[in-house]
Amino acid sequence: MTEITTPDDVLVVTASSGIDFGVRVVEAGATYGLFRLFEADRALVEFYDRRYPHTEHGQFVSRYELDTLLGNHRLWSVPPAPGQGLTLHGGVPDWVIDGATMDRVYAWLRGHAPAAPEVSAA
């Protein structure tokens, strides 16, 4: 199982299917999208299929809020279970990342997650 981090801070993992996926964090305040037309108000995670050079990172597959993937979202606070894979696009069978690979992705993403706000006792 290959795992590298490129100089532009993209994690590259090889899923059990043999497909290399790029995982990129878009920090809050950064621009994103094909022409960098959008500004992220929260940290985002982008997934790319590295087989196809449609962009510098590969073919864009999907994007999620970082907090949602890690189970820290304000409306959804269920952390991923160990070994839980992720279907990136239901219409493309190749775009599924198995549980063992996602465990490595989740570990890497936790290093990019902002600290949870402290709740003060009133």
Image: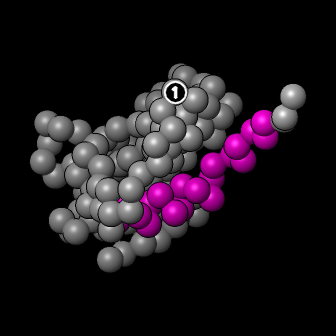
Residue displayed at 42% across by 51% down: 80
Q: Nearer the viewer, residue 87 or 46?
A: 87
In the rendered image of this protein, does residue 88 appear above or below residue 38? below
Residue displayed at 22% across by 69% down: 16
Q: Amino acid at mark 1?
A: Leu
Q: Nearer the viewer, residue 43 or 81?
A: 81
In the rendered image of this protein, does residue 9 appear above or below residue 26? below
- Write down the quadrant of residue 67 in the picture: top right
Residue picked out by circle 1:
75
Residue displayed at 46% across by 43% down: 78
Please say whether residue 96 is one of the residues in the magenta stretch: no
In the rendered image of this protein, does residue 23 appear above or below residue 28? below
Decide: few, some or many residues near mark 1? Use Cα within 10 Å; few <14, some 14-19, many ≥20. few
Region in magenta: 101-119
Residue displayed at 18% across by 65% down: 17
Q: Determine whether, in the image, residue 92 is placed left or right of residue 34.
A: left
